Amino acid sequence: MSISLQGRSVLTLDEFTSEEIGFLLHLAAELKVAKRDGKEVRRLSGKNIALVSDEDSRNAFFGSEVAAYDQGAHPVSMLLPAGNTGQHGSIKDTARVLGRIYDAIEYCGRSQSAVEELAACAHVPVYNGFTDEFQPIQALADFLTVQEFAGKTLPEVAVAFLGDGRSSIARSLAIGAAKLGMDFRIVSPRIFWPAPTFVEHVTSEARKNGGKFAVLEHVGAGVLGADFIYTASWLGEQETGWSERIRLLAPFGVRANVMEATDNPHSKFMHCLPAFHDRSTRAGGRIAKQFGLDCMEVSDAIFESKASVVFDQAENRMHAIKAIFVATIGDQETNAPN
């Protein structure tokens, strides 16, 4: 079956069918093998890609830059502060300028409305690297990682996300898992559950595709039988109310007892990074001093264990964005898996 994503933006996975998501995963896997074997074919020669971020997000483009270079494109990083107005020009005007110069734009920042406005006005593909609401590229990288380590098809896989169920990565994984027919659980304090309308939407998508979706408060029930335990940082750079968040989320930290509660000796641990698993970071040191905690969302023992696939996820982000680049602005057509 032939699938074309030429000219498409990637703002959320909700805009894509299960077949289209499967196509991107297949392409990412092919590109990963080609790079490993030294047989990569450049499909983006002569293309220019703008990598637009707010002040805090430049490290998000490490994989994007390499992906572009591997495929013969020229990436250019630039700052566009969230809510950019006034002397720097509006997002609408900036989008129209970038669209005249670049073949595609990737945005990483806090504002979902900013990436949507870029997509509406630039008239070239726009990719959501991450915002406060969605992380579609990270989710694709995560599904590629699951595909590699599960030892079975995605519809046979169960993933439990522990932590803030309203987070951009939890929401993106939930949508993608529902599209792919997976068993996905959000295990979170009730105060951090996603909105009822979101839960209803994802539940409907999961049923339509033969999957399962649940939002749970009890860790033991939430992780039982899970093939993958996923968590994310509890605190962002702009986070407020640290004490209360830590108090509420502490019972949902991934420790040895959580992995054991899966009753699955092959269960893997996932994290989208950065992770506060010890005192070595500035935030980790602050938390250790203020709250007497050596770690937050995951213990160092689990983070560094053989069950951890976090750095495979980090690498796969590069292969995922490369697949998106190739599929949307590449010069050669690719076919979906049979």
Image: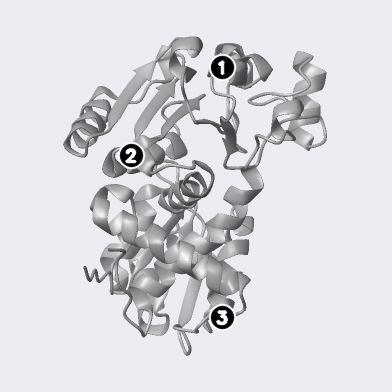
SS at badge 3 = loop
Judging depth in this view, the residue of 187 and 280 nearest the camera is: 187
Q: Left or right: where does residue 338 sit relative to residue 172?
A: left
- Mark 2–mark 3 CB contact (< 8 Å): no
Badge 2 amino acid:
Pro
The image quadrant that residue 310 belongs to is top right
- Taking 301 as reference, is 237 above or below it? below
Residue under pointer 3: 39
As measured in the structure, the alpha-carbon distance from the residue carrying label 2 to the one carrying label 1 is 26 Å
Q: Which mark is residue 160?
A: none
Quadrant the N terminus occupies: bottom left
Residue under pointer 2: 155
Judging depth in this view, the residue of 311 and 9 nearest the camera is: 311
As measured in the structure, the alpha-carbon distance from the residue carrying label 1 to the one carrying label 3 is 44 Å
Earlier residue among tags 2 and 1: 2
Residue 277: x, y in percent? 73, 30
Quadrant the C terminus occupies: bottom left
Residue 144: x, y in percent? 47, 51
SS at badge 1 = helix
As measured in the structure, the alpha-carbon distance from the residue carrying label 2 to the one carrying label 3 is 31 Å
Residue 262: x, y in percent? 53, 19
* Mark 1 burial class by Cα count in 10 Å: few <14, some 14-19, many 20+: many
Q: Left or right: where does residue 131 sit relative to residue 59?
A: left
Residue sitting at 41 percent across and 66 percent down? 27
Residue sitting at 39 percent across and 25 percent down? 185
Badge 3 amino acid:
Lys
Residue sitting at 32 percent across and 50 percent down? 13
Earlier residue among tags 1 and 3: 3
